[in-house]
Image (cartoon, helix red, strand yellow):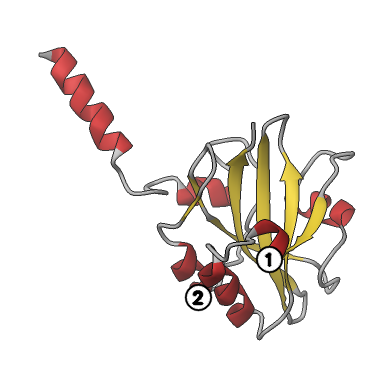
């Protein structure tokens, strides 16, 4: 009977909603080793959080989106090197900056892009392509929320590209 119980436990975990119990761990940097997505004390705008809830980025990983809110000290849309330091990426990693059409040519994630535009008062939205290793890449879809420190707000998702 232990085998049945183990299998049932496996099925329950496999069918649990995305991000169930992991969203806080990923946002704070705990749990899986990952890049920083939200500054301490900062919040992801509600319109973005609502847009990414339950949405999966389709790749070999099929990972859910994670909210992003990072202060830029008024720098606005930053270059790849500055972005790497904001998220805690090792130096020397080549980060590419893409237009939305390069990342989402079929408009599958238009609702997320629109939510980011809403949160940034119609501002420009760009994609930072951050390589993690030979096959794993993170796509950070962000815009600049104006204010005292200017924040990059948006969402990121992991993609497996083999």
Image coordinates of residue 145 in percent, x first then y, are 70, 77
Q: Quadrant of the C terminus?
A: top right
Q: Secondary structure at mark 1?
A: strand
153 with respect to 10 (left or right): right
Circle 2/circle 1 CB separation < 8 Å:
no
Task: Classify residue 41 by image quadrant.
Answer: bottom right
Task: Classify residue 148 by image quadrant.
Answer: bottom right
Q: Which is more toward the observer, 23 or 98?
A: 98
Image coordinates of residue 154 in percent, x first then y, are 62, 65
**Mark 2 or 1 closer to N-term?**
2
Q: Quadrant of the N terminus?
A: top left
> Residue 56 got which mark?
none
Q: Residue at x 55, y 75 (%)?
A: 115
> Residue 47 got which mark?
2
Q: Secondary structure at mark 2?
A: helix
Q: Residue at x 89, y 39 (%)?
A: 92
Q: Is residue 137 above or below residue 157?
A: above
């Amino acid at each position: 009977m232990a085998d049945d119980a183990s299998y049932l436990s496996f099925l329950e975990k496999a069918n649990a909603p995305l991000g169930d119990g992991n969203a806080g761990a990923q946002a704070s940097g705990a749990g899986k080793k990952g890049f920083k997505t939200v500054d301490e004390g900062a919040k992801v705008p509600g319109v973005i959080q609502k847009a990414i809830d339950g949405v999966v980025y389709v790749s070999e990983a099929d990972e859910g989106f994670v909210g992003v809110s990072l202060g830029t000290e008024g720098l606005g849309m930053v270059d790849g090197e500055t972005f790497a330091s904001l998220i805690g990426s090792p130096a020397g990693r080549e980060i590419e900056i893409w237009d939305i059409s390069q990342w989402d040519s079929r408009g599958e994630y238009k609702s997320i892009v629109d939510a980011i535009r809403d949160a940034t008062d119609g501002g420009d939205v760009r994609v930072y392509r951050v390589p993690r290793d030979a096959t794993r890449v993170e796509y950070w879809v962000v815009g600049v929320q104006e204010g005292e420190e200017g924040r990059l707000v948006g969402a990121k998702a992991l993609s497996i590209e083999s």
